[in-house]
Amino acid sequence: MYALVDGNNFYVSCERVFRPSLQGRPVIVLSNNDGCAIARSNEAKALGVKMAAPWFEIRHLADSHGLVALSANFTLYGDMSDRMMSLAAGLGPTQEIYSIDESFIGLDGVRGDLTKRAFAVRARINQWVGIPCGVGIGATKTLAKLANYIAKTAERKHGSYPDDLAQVCNLCALPASDMDAVLAATEVSEVWGVGRRIAKQLQDGGINTVLDLVRMDPATVRSRWSVVLERTVRELQGLPCIELEDAPLPKKEIACTRSFGRPVTDLRPLIEAVSEFAGRAAEKLRRQGSVAREILVFAHTSPFRPGPRFSRSTVVPLRRPTADTALLVNAATAGMRQIYEPGYQLIKAGVMLLDLVPGTVRQGELDLEGDDEDANRSRLMTAMDALNGRFGKGTLHVASTGIDDHSRVWGMRQERRTPHYTTSWEEMPVARA
DNA sequence: TCTGGGGTCCTAGGACCC
DNA sequence: TCTGGGGTCCTAGGACCC
């Protein structure tokens, strides 16, 4: 049995903790570059703001309806997430942190009334961290997800409720007849694993509700769609097919990509950008103790804007697997020089570290560049990570990323960012009597 | 003026092998 | 008229997730 604990409108809720005046108002959080809405309060949803709606198309709502838009403050959200997750873990013996605002809890062996227990954990998160949560409980992860969705919408049906009222739904405690009614009242597109495409195909075939989907024959689903959807159907039928990953698996690829604050045409800023991205990706790589065998570099023009299109990428193999910032930056800049062509308004670039292997695996090689050199480089990287950890990101970086922020023509726009309330002494909120 | 970033898994098809 | 059978590995692309 599983629970899914999930923070409501998470980014907005994080902002509201430190700015209570945002309670009850339509609030959204914007993506990098203040591009589009990536989180919406219930009031903003009620105004008709869609997920990923471009800001320039909805900004008139600021004047007409008091819509508040904030730049994404991922440092804050990450820290609030850590606090929320550590409390959610109290619900059961195992936990899988599934995303920044969701975790699955394994409930095997938990005794007593699960629903009560879920309410208690939810209340504690609300009181200690200030984030309103919903909790769904079901026999499988897919059912727990569904329960979580129902917990959120059941109350919306009784009228408009503020974000913090999302509660608890325990499908395991529901009599079979009620269960059918609930499934029949829920659209198939809400199921975890059913996206837009498949939802459309299902509806075209007359499968409209979750109940319709549950009653399908898994073998038919497999032959007409895929094993993925077959698993989803079995999970909805109560047969666990997706296990809890309580020890996070190492990433198989690590990316760092960004849209630019404004279009870039020259090579130099592109070199700066991919140097920065490669450095960031290398840090993530070292954090999980892996090394990369190749690095992909790409750049492209806006898919939305007229004008000549450009989209190119290249994979640069590393001479040997590495997590060394300097080597990865070198490879990334070499790749960028290779694909670069003048005359295009590029709006995005990025790097991806590919073919990752554990850092402990070392390829034996007929090469006289000794291990001493390697060991020194590795100590250098450890020192660099430690300094950046202590004094802040970017304290120590390779010079090709550009020396100062102002010269970075590619830097991202963030005009409405709130302070790093919980992670920076300078930005800590001050309470006045 | 203006449209995010970071992942995973599965499948089909081609290259290649014996 | 007629052209085997069975595998593996890799890649690109699709679909999904938050």
Image (spheres, coloured by chain):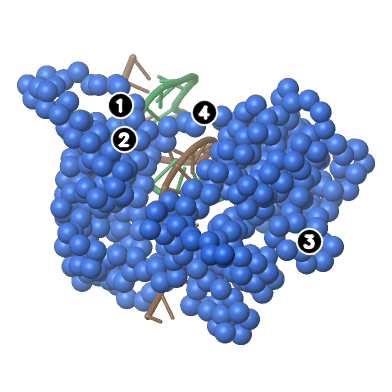
Chain colours: A blue, B brown, C green
Q: Nearer the viewer, mark 2 or mark 1?
A: 2
Name the residue carrying label 2: A286
Contact, mark 2 vs mark 1 (Cβ under 8 Å): yes
Residue type at mark 3 is: Arg
Lower position in the chain sequence, tag 1 or tag 4: 4
Is circle 3 on the same chain as circle 2?
A: yes
Judging by the rendered image, the residue that carries numbered circle 3 is: A156
The image quadrant that residue A60 belongs to is bottom right
Residue placed at 54% from the left, 47% from the top? A81
| Chain on which label 2 sits | A
Residue, disc 1: A359
| Chain of the residue that carries numbered disc 3 in the rendered image | A
In the rendered image, residue A405, in percent from the top left (x then y), is placed at 24, 64
Dot 4 amino acid type: Ala
Of the numbered discs 4 and 2, the one sitting upstream in the chain is 4
3 or 2: tag closer to the N-terminus = 3
- Marks 1 and 4 sit apart, C-alpha to C-alpha, by 18 Å
Q: Give the mark count.
A: 4
User: Could you say which is closer to the camera, residue A225 or residue A159?
Assistant: A159
Q: Which mark is residue A247?
A: 4
Q: Check the residue under mark 1 and report the chain it is in.
A: A
Circle 1: is it few (<14), some (14-19), or many (20+) Cα within 10 Å?
Answer: some
Task: For mark 4, give the secondary structure.
Answer: loop
Labels 1 and 4 touching (C-beta < 8 A): no
